[in-house]
Amino acid sequence: MSHENHTFYLWINGQKVAGSEGRTFWVTNPATEEPVYEVHEATLNDVERAVQAAKTAFLDGRWSKLPLAERQARLNRFADLLEAHQDEIVEAESRQSGKPVKLVRYSDFPFSVDNLRYFAGQLRALEGQAQAEYNGAHSSWIRREPVGVVAGIAPWNYPIMMAIWKLAPALAAGNTMILKPASITPVTALMLGPIAQEAGIPDGVLNIIAGPGRIIGQALVEHPDVAMISLTGDTATGRQIMAAGAHRVKRLHLELGGKAPAIVLDDANLEAAIRGIAVGSLVNSGQDCTAATRAYVHRSRYQDFLDGIAQVYREVRLGDPLNLSTDLGPVVSQAQWQKIDSYVTNAATMGGRIVLGGGRPEHLPRGHYYQPTLITDVEQHWPIVQEEVFGPVLVVLPFDTDAEALAKANDVEYGLASSVWTENLRRGLWFSRELQFGEVWLNDHLPLTSEMPHGGVKQSGFGHDLSRYSLDEYTTVKHVMADMDNETVKGWHFTILGDVPE
Ligand code: NAD
């Protein structure tokens, strides 16, 4: 790789630019703990430049007023070009985040490309209510319009996928945008600028800036010319953004944290549950907002489940993320490693039993590796059961009745994802109605599809990614009403002018 390929610039108004104060920062490979990419850091001036570029591009309609077929064609070309750049994007994604290339190449990346193609198709199907003369004298219709300048603020756990989840519906709906990836994983998002330009996305429509969230993210949230903030991140960040956006009544889309339960009923296919929950809890080293974090297992199956999942956990291959046979890479940073370890240590101190794992694997002295960790003998109110750990850690709790499992599953402040494992459809459907989560899987945990919405309730936020629901959120609904009778004195004018007619 040449030096040039190690240095990443901001992307503003169709150009690679250095940060206005000339500062750069380094992105570290979590597997080697070595700096691998140098990135130009955006300042408040750069926020201003990016917002003005996006505002100008929005106002002159260079994107929003393109014929829809043309907008679709360019987004599809963007998807084609992304595929052409697959190898370099997959490698950079793995180096900056520690994700196994296996996961990026066969899951994150193709799903991102599919998402772009899905929204390219959907944009031609936007529609409003049918036109009609609702009160006799006027004809009404609905215009669905883009919101304007959108700021997409993304997390570090799925850098390329979250970038695409933000930009695909926003651009499909005709908005212009500023994308701000997480500071520790900005590289693959920054790679998107020139590719978008080559695909025919006009300059200024997509701007990408990297830098600290509490400075440049906050500035985007507060900026009067930014019409909408779409955040995927921590619930605490969501709260800060709501507060900062409040004085401008900013439109928000918040995809926040999760603490997914996986409920294994007495009649479950145990092999499937063990395998599915192992995968659901370990995906991306557990750094996944939908990851299975709490297994509630019927007491009659509890020991078998525990033995089985311990066996699967033992077989997981931790190692170099660039090796295609690696199952699990490191977690993203030392800070994240410490956070995970303090939850595990705290649970042990409180009397929890570490059945397996905890801490660093002996054979990997370097890199932020954390062992798959199983914990039992914990209580519902403990932090390890209530809070987002965001690591390869699963707590397993027994239950006796369906009602108890449901109550415990719902008893967290989050409401993003959940799963139920049963061979009885009626029981599964009952849980799907009663679970207070935006997603319920029956006999699986994790799969998502571009056509179906992904979003939370409670402190997991509001708004949806993926699907037609997402496209709707990046548009406004405008009601247009036209007088059809052309009468100067209208029947209702007396309510303001003159007497009630006889
Ligand atoms: P984070 O909240 O720390 O950061 C997310 C983004 O917000 C980053 O780009 C960051 O720079 C920016 N930011 C931070 N403070 C800000 C502020 N005051 N104003 C504006 N922007 C600010 O989250 P993270 O640690 O990068 O990601 C992990 C979190 O994301 C977890 O809680 C996880 O559950 C959540 N997540 C949710 C979903 C979902 O779909 N609900 C998906 C993936 C991740």
Image: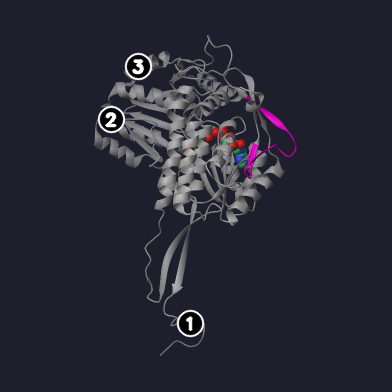
Label 1 vs label 3: CA separation? 76 Å
Circle 1 Cα neighbour tier, 10 Å, few/some/many (<14 / 14–19 / ≥20): few
User: What colour scheme does the image use?
Assistant: one colour
Is residue 146 toward the left or the right of residue 263 in the image? right
Q: Position of residue 409 (x, y in %)?
A: 39, 34
Dot 3: element: helix
Q: N-terminal of the two: label 3 or label 2?
A: 3
The amino acid sitting under disc 3 is: Gly
Q: N-terminal of the two: label 1 or label 2?
A: 2
- Point out the image quarter for the N terminus: top right
The amino acid sitting under disc 2 is: Thr
Q: N-terminal of the two: label 1 or label 3?
A: 3
Dot 2: element: loop
Nearest the eye: 448 or 53: 53
Q: Which residue is mark 2?
A: 422
* Mark 1 vs ligand 1: CB below 8 Å: no
